[in-house]
Image (tube, rainbow, N blue to C red):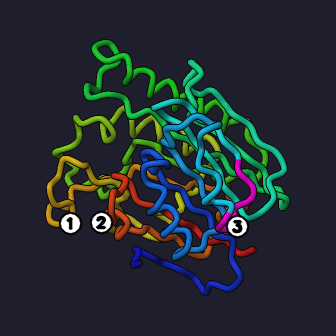
Amino acid sequence: MTDTTTSRGMADTLKIVSWNINSVRFRIEIVERFLKEAQPDILCLQETKVIDGDFPAAPFRRLGYEHIVLHGQRMHHGVAILSRLPIVEDDRLDWQANGEARHIGVRLPNGMRIENVYVPAGGDIPDRTLNPKFGQKLDFVERMTRWSETLAVPTLLVGDFNIAPLPSDVWGHKQLLKVVSHTPIEVDALDALKASNSWVDLGRHFHPAPARLHTWWSYRSPDWTRNDRGRRLDHMWATREIADKAVAHHVFEDCRSWLKPSDHVPIMTEFTA
């Protein structure tokens, strides 16, 4: 398995992965393969598409992920955190303000919080009047921003943000300016979230713009490798004290070509333990 990687002298590290799996039950085989090959300590999943009682916990436990925290929902949404390390506490914040299962957070014994989020896609029309889903997306990010402003603990924010903020985060900046996920109003909203707590974008910390950095390719493309019409929708952001411990960031593009792939690929940051 190859990946896009930049590192600084890795030693004993804590490996944390984020992956929009687009149905964990349907893709459990590639999840198991990835865990065996990448050996992360913590896996944060989005779009699990399963209620908690039907979550396929057994394969994870066989691989050593004994600590499982779920926030599921039938058919849609759903997030999960699976860990080899003990989890001290967890929370579920309703940034969608309608009960959708889009967030789960935990605290590790070392005091680090991990907040795993699945931001709404926002529909196809970038106008909150014509498309209420777009307004819900902007409101979701606004609620995250208000939360972030009062955050006072070392935190790693991960997940599918469904926004590609930089021109080099998409295959065609000019072509996508009016396409949901790269519109100026979404980018402005995400920039405000980032500024609210001086978050460090770990992907761009290790792969500075304008380097190509994509994590999602549409199923509509018959050959994603040939067209390479990707977007960076998946992110890992850290507060400064956590960012200072980061030593590497990986984007596992090969997973997009595995059997029954998600349209997203896993991303992983390594931290000094």
- Residue 32 x, y percent position in the rendering: 52, 65
Q: Is residue 155 left or right of residue 260?
A: right
Determine which residue is flagged by label 2: 257
- What kind of element bears circle 3? loop
Query: Mark 3, mark 1: which one is toward the viewer?
Result: 3
Image point (65%, 63%), residue name: 243
Q: Which residues are magenta?
A: 62-68
Q: CA distance from mark 2 to mark 1?
A: 9 Å
Earlier sequence position, callout 3 versus callout 1? 3
Type of the residue with mark 2: Ser
Image point (68%, 51%), residue name: 114
Tell whether position 65 is magenta.
yes
- Residue 156 x, y percent position in the rendering: 65, 54
| Picture layout, residue 39 above or below residue 139 | below
Front-most of residues 125 and 74: 74
Instruction: Bin the neighbour count of mark 2 within 10 Å (Cα to Cα): few under 14, some 14-19, many 20 and up.
Output: some
Picture mark count: 3
Tell whether position 235 is magenta.
no
Q: CA distance from mark 2 to mark 3?
A: 26 Å
Determine which residue is flagged by label 1: 225
Quadrant where the C terminus is found in the figure: bottom right
Type of the residue with mark 3: Gly
Determine which residue is flagged by label 3: 64
Quadrant where the N terminus is found in the figure: bottom left
- Residue 115 x, y percent position in the rendering: 65, 46
Earlier sequence position, callout 2 versus callout 1? 1
Query: Mark 2, mark 1: which one is toward the viewer?
Result: 2
Earlier sequence position, callout 2 versus callout 3? 3
Q: Are marks 2 and 1 in contact (CB under 8 Å)?
A: yes
